[in-house]
Amino acid sequence: MNANQPASIWTRAFALLCLAEFLGYAQHFALQPTLPLYITHLGGSPFVVGLVIAAFGVTSVISRPIIGYWVDRWSETGVMALGMAAQALSIFFCFMPFSAAVIFSNALRGIGWSSMAAAGYTLLATAAPKERRGEASGYFGGIQSSATIIFPAVALWIIDAPLGGFSAVFFFAIVLVSSGATAAWALSRVTPQRIRASEISAEPWWREILNVVDRHILSAALLLFVLNLSLPCFSSFVVLYARQLGVEHFAWYYVAVGVTSACARPLLGRFSDKLGAGRSLIIAFVLETVALVSMPFAANLGGLVICGALWFSGAAIGGARIMALAIEQAPVERRGRAMASFSTAFPLSNGTGALINGIIVDLAGFHWMFVTAGLLCASGLVLTAKYWSALK
């Protein structure tokens, strides 16, 4: 290879990693609009919807230390495959028509999700060329978010189909994530071995597990937390908001924002390599804030799509740059633990945001939910200013 020619991103290992992540995220996005509707169908309130989403986040965060430990000590692909299999098994509890069973199911699914996420980020760090990490992160995130193009809409169509319903969606999600586990197993055949923490670390195993936060990626994790704090507004609660407004054919919202997110992540990820972390994050938080404060004025499908597209564009450029930042900051010999710590930010922000959203909707309605989320999102600009010197 010519010394001036950039290293290829699309290796067989990277392609299989993206396929496994795509199928795992497809399952997640199929359940995203389904669970809020299922809970309200069972008689639950928006607060209960928030509890369901928060249960996923809590277990995902709590399980990360031991999962990060096993990623470093055992196998990234093994942890990913087991995590996806665990998600498939957890969805069976949703067939029980009780809100408590759905909360328990989502809590178990959070553990499987944390395994998939921690292992996936670690494998990305290995597969991505150093000089193209922003671009690789953009493709990786674009593949993940491309599942939003069709699978939330398909889930809504299945619910309304004559032979469909909620049970059909749950079975569909099980098939998707089980296929992802198969792709993860195939990935294990082509992934090169790396240095294991057990080969160089003198720390006792219990101390490694209890050391939850890796200080090297703390700034990246905080930025990712704030960036995704308002995600439930546009992924889960928006379907309830659309029902309140009487918006018809709402499944097309997910198609539109899915196309936006899938196209924006690789393009803006590459752009963020040139623009730099600080400027990329300013653009990201401004776009998300504008989208949130505009949502109360959206009264039809077109308005909801425009606001959603703005938010997901901001999340695309910010997410790609933050992921690249975390990869750069993570120590190679403890990359599994570091990326596990980093990946807690997403479910923690999703669960926290969902709880806040559910409480505010019950107390004051959807309009105040969006305004409050916009104020919280704007705090990301303050955080960016705080870390500005490190982001350079």
Image (tube, grey):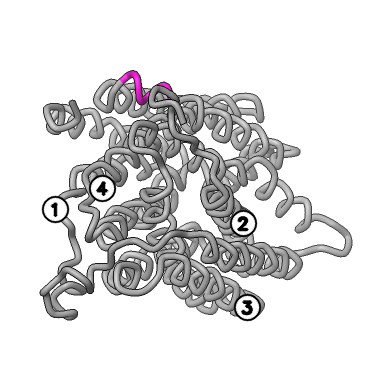
Q: Quadrant of the C terminus?
A: top left
Mark 4 → mark 1, Cα distance in angstroms? 10 Å
Could you say which quadrant of the image residue 175 lies in? Answer: bottom right
Query: x, y percentage for residue 113?
Result: 46, 64
Could you say which quadrant of the image residue 344 lies in? Answer: bottom left
Mark 4 → mark 3, Cα distance in angstroms? 32 Å
> Sequence order check: which comes first, mark 4 or mark 1?
1
Amino acid residing under circle 4: Ala
Query: x, y percentage for residue 76?
Result: 41, 65
Residue beneath disc 3:
92
Residue beneath disc 2:
23
| Nearer to us: label 1 or label 3 | 1
Give the magenta part as a residue range: 269-275
Query: x, y percentage for residue 22?
Result: 59, 51
Residue beneath disc 4:
221
Residue shown at the point (36%, 32%) measured from the top left: 318
Task: Tell me the SS state at disc 1.
Answer: helix
| Nearer to us: label 4 or label 3 | 4
Q: Tell me whether the residue at label 4 lies in contact with that at label 3, contact meaning CB atoms closer than 8 angstroms.
A: no
Residue beneath disc 1:
215
